[in-house]
Image: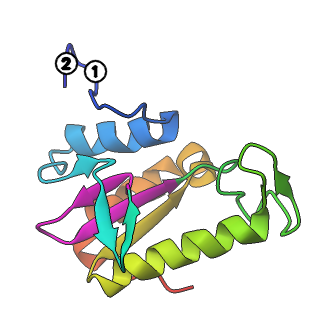
Amino acid sequence: MENGRIKTKFKLTKPHQKVKQFMIDENIYSGFESEKQIKANNRFYHPDEINKEKMLIIEIFGDYWHCNPSKFNSEYINKSVNKIAKEIWKYDREKISNYKREGYSVLVIWEEDINENLEEIKKKIRRKDKWIKYAS
């Protein structure tokens, strides 16, 4: 942290900043790193937050970039990545599955939930020892 601001080489989204700042404020960020490259099932990824020692990953899915199913139908075309929603969802499922294969517990948080249910998200993060492996 620099001058009270989160410092990283990647520009964190506002939802990611909220989650990370909460973890720092609660003193539960120790061991986590933002956007650290890892190899999972012979593919390279940059999970939003990773704690390699405790084998924990937090992915913060932006509603637009990950085409939140509560907001977009499966045929929606995300022009920024030139893919339809169901292709994005398939990639995300594969990524989470690859994390699981490497032994990580994963918490996926949607931007919508951060904006509408932040207190519930904070409870889930605090219970990181109770995270379950993502099931698709």
Q: Which mark is residue 20?
A: none
Is residue 132 visible to us here? no
Measure the alpha-carbon separation of dots 1 and 2: 5 Å
Q: Which mark is residue 2?
A: 2
**Looking at the image, what colour scheme do you see?**
rainbow
Which is nearer the eye, 6 or 101?
101
Quadrant position of residue 130 = bottom left
Quadrant position of residue 92 = bottom right
Q: Is the residue 26 above or below the residue 49 in the image?
A: above
Residue 19 percent location from the top left of the image: 38, 44
Residue at the image position 26 percent from the left and 27 percent from the top: 7
| Extreme residue in the front direction | 42
Q: Is the residue 135 above or below the residue 51 in the image?
A: below
Label 1 residue SS: loop
Residue at the image position 50 percent from the left and 86 percent from the top: 135
Q: Which mark is residue 5?
A: 1
Q: Is residue 38 left or right of residue 3?
A: right
- The stretch of residues the image draws in magenta is 46-60
Is residue 84 visible to us here? yes
Residue at the image position 77 percent from the left and 64 percent from the top: 85
